[in-house]
Image (spheres, helix red, strand yellow):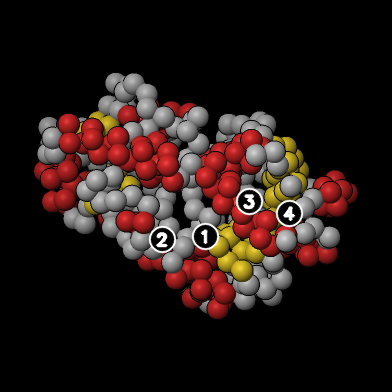
Amino acid sequence: MKLVIFGLSVSSSWGNGHATLWRGLCAALSRRHHDVVFFERDVPYYASTRDMETLPGGQLILYSDWAETLPLIERHLHEADVAMTTSYCPDAIAASQLIFESNVHVRCFYDLDTPITLDRLRRGLKVDYIGERGLRDFDLTLSYSGGASLKELQNRLGAGTVFPLYGSVDPSVHFPVLPSNEYRSDISYLGTWSVDRQQRLEELFVEPAKRMPQARFVIGGSMYDDRFPWQPNIHLKNHIPSSDHPTFYCSAKLNLNVTRQAMADNGYCPSGRLFEAAACGCVTLSDAWEGLETFFEPEKEILIARDTNDTLEALKRDPEELHRLGRAAREKAMSCHTADIRARELESYLTQKAA
């Protein structure tokens, strides 16, 4: 199949979780002999932080003006079997209209931000990447979130066929590596500062740092400032490039995952960090949310923290026990959550609709 995708940014992973997912998925689709063309608007923010110039296994087309690029877009749509618009695509409405007018076999919308979409709809706010007719004109809707979110996309936006397409990991990018003194920690947290994660981050990370002054706590991420409740043993590494993520994970005894509030409220919405750390053979300590056990088994493949004491207890665990848990997490990631597995799932969904 030839797939034409209109998305946010695949060329820059700076503050953008879409990029890593698409890079792995496109490479996996290419290995399955599909042709992928990804249209990305060339905006200054992502241009200045670009860490990929060519799309693995596909063709990346950067454009600055939609109207000027229209002939090229129409040519690729004419050749395509599948055309897809994604959440937060800056030209999503225009791209969707072109898809509806084209002769592609499957018209698809992939919401990589379903909890945010549904949260805005519940509050009566506009969703910039979805038109007035909702999702009813698409043949297929894919959702990064599962569970009740799938039915809500149908009820609120008129989506017809809806399937979950969760995050994944590329094992050629994320795998066990040697630790680094630069990132060495008892517990690390990788994530951009966010107001809706702050309370849980303080409870599961900052408060344990206060109670364990001899331990080393490391944050990797941007947008932290002097208002953050820093402790002497909390160290900031400002933005960890994606190429350093395996080293960051492998340099920590534990890796903390704190879920965005909208994702936690919806459930069944795993952060890509869970799959990445697991593929590196590392132990994740995650906050609790509905559906987590469908991705990793608590106490055997992942640890759960509901309060400060849970973090403190996790830090006291025997190293050999944590090593076994990390191995089990990697086995689960390799057997259930790789980009190749998601590519096969996507291929199956598309084939069903194209039949």
List the residue tagged with mark 2.
268
Front in this rendered view, residue 98 or 102: 102
| Marks 2 and 4, how far apart at CA | 26 Å
Q: Is residue 298 above or below residue 282?
A: below
Of callouts 1 and 4, the N-terminal one: 4
Q: Secondary structure at mark 2?
A: loop
Question: Which residue type carries mark 2?
Answer: Tyr
Identify the residue under disc 3: 347
Residues at discs 2 and 4 in contact (Cβ within 8 Å): no
What amino acid is at disc 4?
Val
Q: How crowded is the residue under tag 3: few (<14 C-alpha within 10 Å), some, or many (20+)?
A: some
User: CA separation, marks 2 and 1?
Assistant: 10 Å
Can I make out residue 277 in this image?
Answer: no
Figure disc tally: 4
Asked if the residue under mark 1 is in contact with the one under mark 2, i.e. CB atoms within 8 Å, the reply is: yes
At horizontal 34% and vertical 21% (from top left) the residue drawn is 178
Q: Residue at x 13, y 45 (%)?
A: 313
- Residue 15: x %, y % from top left: 50, 44
User: Who comes first in sequence, dot 2 or dot 1?
Assistant: 1
Residue position for label 4: 82
According to the picture, the residue beneath numbered tag 1 turns out to be: 164
Looking at the picture, does residue 303 appear above or below residue 282?
A: below
Q: Residue at x 28, y 36 (%)?
A: 326
